[in-house]
């Protein structure tokens, strides 16, 4: 795409259509999950109102569709990556980032609706909110093509962002995810590890550092993504900003729900996380894409960060890219295994 020094109208129509498709996908998301939940319930229905094969086909189909939105977000963010970037392309690229983060944004929206006792109206609120966002996006974006202004971030920020991330992996995340993976070995193993880890991360010394660290990651990550989305990014660079935005939404939702549940005296253990006794398939199905992508995005984001460090140290791009893609594949595998454990698989 070239930026016209003379203004032209047609690219705006294209990006407007693309953004309309993105918003339609986001609006459809709650309904998709409702169908998924119906199919999930039918799989456990002893009376077999639905034939088992239909129920399981429904589960697979609706889950694939729920993941289709983030996948579409990736391709749309890539489609708007050429430079120089127009305001319309930036508009499309940022809307694509929102589509990618939909599974966690939807969990966050449900959590906040619950906090203000509006759970029954959450779908209406979701639709109203996104129609307002769409109106704002269309209103704020000029109807004629103009070059987008580039946004900057302090030069020290990426280094501090990466260092805090590494510290959080060491002091919390490695243990947290290992603990979730251990559910494959049985809930007693998972519980024993969780109680041991809690002595560390719930201590009066570590807990405030952890929370401050994660809040810093959200704030600094949003600033970095704002800057990076206005410049050229290749496939892994796009994945880095997409997974970063996803993690910001994920953490915002995850921390709010964990701490608000704890403040109400609920034990935020495995049973809480897996929506027991109903289970995730028949209960709070929205947690399936939310958690699966949470783990996959975390590992992928770390892999993309490592790639940037490797490139800075003169490692060949091909090698650095291969390492990042391998880490992302490992993240997808880890996420699938943890989700299998959450859905009841035991080894
Ligand atoms: C399948 C994925 C995940 C599940 C099931 C899960 C579940 C949980 C549960 C049950 C708690 C409460 C722990 C307790 O009460 O001791 C918790 C806390 C937390 N989780 Fe996760 N989590 C997941 C992934 C993640 C990821 C990817 C991150 C970070 C990117 C994360 C960050 C946190 C943080 C910061 C806390 C608060 C810890 C504290 O009490 O200080 N979690 N999570």
Image (tube, grey):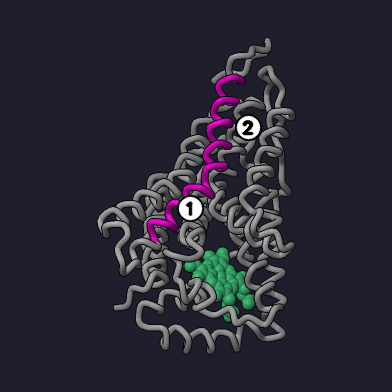
Does residue 234 lie above or below 313 as drawn? above
The percent coordinates of residue 320 (x first, y second) are: 42, 50
Q: Which residues are magenta?
A: 12-40
Q: Earlier in the sequence, mark 2 or mark 1?
A: 1
- For marks 2 and 1, give the CA distance: 29 Å
Q: Residue at x 70, y 63 (%)?
A: 215
Please tell me whether mark 2 sits on a helix, a strand or a loop. helix
- 327 part of magenta stretch: no
Q: Quadrant of residue 208?
A: bottom right
User: Disc 2 marks which residue?
Assistant: 90
Overall secondary structure of the magenta stretch?
A: helix
Compare residues 324 and 194 and report the one nearer the observer: 194
Q: Nearer the viewer, mark 2 or mark 1?
A: 1
- For disc 2, does the CB lie below 8 Å from ligand 1? no
Residue 172 appears in the picture as rendered: no
Q: Secondary structure at mark 1?
A: helix
């Amino acid at each position: 795409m070239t930026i016209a020094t003379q203004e032209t109208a047609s690219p705006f129509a294209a990006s407007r259509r693309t953004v309309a498709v993105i918003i339609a996908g986001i609006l459809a998301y709650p309904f998709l999950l409702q169908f998924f939940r119906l199919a999930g319930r039918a799989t456990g229905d002893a009376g077999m109102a639905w034939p088992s094969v239909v129920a399981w086909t429904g589960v697979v189909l609706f889950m694939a569709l729920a993941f289709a939105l983030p996948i579409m977000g990736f391709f749309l963010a890539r489609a708007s990556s050429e430079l120089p970037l127009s305001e319309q392309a930036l508009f499309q690229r940022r809307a694509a980032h929102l589509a990618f983060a939909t599974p966690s944004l939807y969990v966050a929206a449900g959590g906040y609706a619950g906090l203000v006792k509006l759970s029954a109206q959450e779908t209406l609120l979701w639709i109203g909110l996104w129609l307002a966002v769409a109106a704002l996006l269309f209103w704020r974006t000029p109807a004629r093509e103009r070059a987008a202004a580039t946004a900057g971030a302090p030069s020290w920020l990426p280094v501090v962002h990466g260092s805090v991330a590494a510290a959080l992996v060491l002091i919390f995340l490695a243990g947290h995810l290992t603990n979730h993976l251990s559910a494959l070995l049985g809930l007693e193993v998972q519980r024993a590890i969780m109680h041991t880890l809690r002595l560390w991360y719930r201590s009066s010394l570590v807990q405030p550092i952890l929370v401050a660290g994660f809040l810093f990651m959200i704030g600094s990550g949003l600033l970095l993504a704002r800057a990076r989305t206005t410049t050229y990014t290749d496939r892994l660079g796009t994945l880095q900003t997409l997974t970063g935005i996803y993690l910001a939404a994920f953490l915002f939702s995850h921390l709010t729900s964990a701490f608000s549940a704890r403040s109400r005296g609920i034990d935020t253990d495995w049973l809480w996380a897996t929506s027991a006794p109903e289970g995730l398939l028949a209960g709070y199905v929205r947690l399936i894409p939310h958690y699966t992508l949470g783990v996959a995005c975390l590992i992928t984001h770390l892999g993309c960060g490592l790639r940037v460090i490797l490139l800075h140290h003169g490692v060949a791009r091909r090698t650095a890219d291969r390492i990042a893609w391998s880490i992302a594949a490992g993240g997808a595998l880890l996420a699938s295994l943890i989700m299998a454990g959450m859905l009841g698989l035991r080894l």
